[in-house]
Image (cartoon, helix red, strand yellow):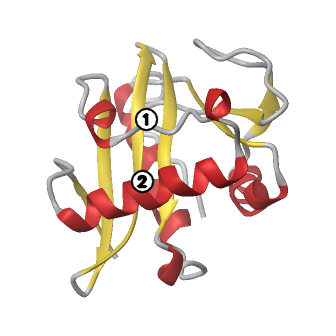
C-alpha cells in the first residue's frame, strides 16, 4: 500500500469523498454532518492523503491543524470495495506518525454515534483513542462522539517513533 499526499484532483478521489459525504447523510441530520467536501479539504490547515494499491484507490485521510500542539483527523474513509484489507489501519498509522513529526501532543476526532460508525470507533479505540468532550468548534450532539489520543511527539522525545501496530 502506498500513501501519497494528494491534491484532490483525481476523479477517483473526488468520487470517494462524494461516497463519504453521501454515506454521512444516510446516518446523520445535516446539522450533525462534519465531513468536509473537496473544497474544504483544500485549505492550508489540512493535509490530505490517499492510499493506493496496484493503481486502485483504497481510501483517504486528512490531518487538520487546530493549533501548534493539537491536530484533528478528518475524512478517514476506506472505499466500500476495499474494506477489511487494512487500509484504514495503515492510514491511521500514517496520520499519527505525521502528527508526531509535527510536534503535536494530541490528536482528536469526531465520528458518528450510530451503529454504522462502530467499526470506525473500534479502530480508533484499538489505537488508544479515548472518548472525550467536544473540542475545537464542536458542541454536544447526540449524533456525534468525540475521541482523543495523547501522542509522544518527536519535538519532545528526540527521534522517538511509536509503533502503532
Decide which of 88, 10 is in the foreground and name it. 10
Q: Label 2 to label 1, Cα distance in Å?
A: 9 Å
Along the polypeptide, which appears first: circle 2 or circle 1?
A: 2
As drawn, the label of residue 31 is none
Q: Secondary structure at mark 2?
A: helix
Mark 2 touches mark 1? (CB < 8 Å) = no
Left/right placement of residue 137 relative to residue 93 reads right
The residue at 67%/31% (across/down) is: 32
Is residue 18 in sight in this rendering? yes
The residue at 82%/50% (across/down) is: 114
As drawn, the label of residue 94 is 2
The residue at 52%/55% (across/down) is: 22
Q: Whole-percent x and y of residue 79?
A: 46, 71
Q: Residue furthest bottom?
A: 54
Q: Whole-percent x and y of residue 44?
A: 23, 23
The quadrant holding residue 126 is: bottom right
Other residues around mark 2 within 10 Å, as few (<14) / some (14–19) / many (≥20): some
The residue at 28%/57% (across/down) is: 14
The quadrant holding residue 40 is: top left
Amino acid at each position: 500500500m502506498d500513501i501519497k499526499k494528494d491534491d484532490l484532483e483525481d476523479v477517483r478521489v473526488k468520487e470517494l469523498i462524494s461516497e463519504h459525504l453521501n454515506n454521512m447523510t444516510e446516518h446523520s441530520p445535516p446539522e450533525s454532518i462534519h465531513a468536509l467536501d473537496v473544497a474544504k479539504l483544500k485549505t492550508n490547515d489540512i493535509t490530505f492523503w490517499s492510499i493506493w494499491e496496484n493503481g486502485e484507490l483504497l481510501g483517504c485521510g486528512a490531518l487538520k491543524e487546530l493549533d501548534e500542539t493539537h491536530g484533528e483527523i478528518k475524512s478517514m474513509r476506506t472505499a466500500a470495495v476495499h474494506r477489511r484489507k487494512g487500509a484504514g489501519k495503515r492510514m491511521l498509522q500514517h496520520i499519527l506518525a505525521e502528527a508526531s513529526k509535527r510536534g503535536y501532543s494530541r490528536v482528536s476526532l469526531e465520528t458518528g454515534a450510530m451503529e454504522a460508525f462502530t467499526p470506525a470507533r473500534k479502530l480508533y479505540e484499538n489505537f488508544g483513542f479515548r472518548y472525550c468532550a467536544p473540542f475545537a468548534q464542536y458542541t454536544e450532539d447526540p449524533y456525534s462522539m468525540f475521541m482523543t489520543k495523547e501522542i509522544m511527539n518527536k519535538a519532545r522525545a528526540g527521534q522517538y517513533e511509536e509503533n502503532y501496530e
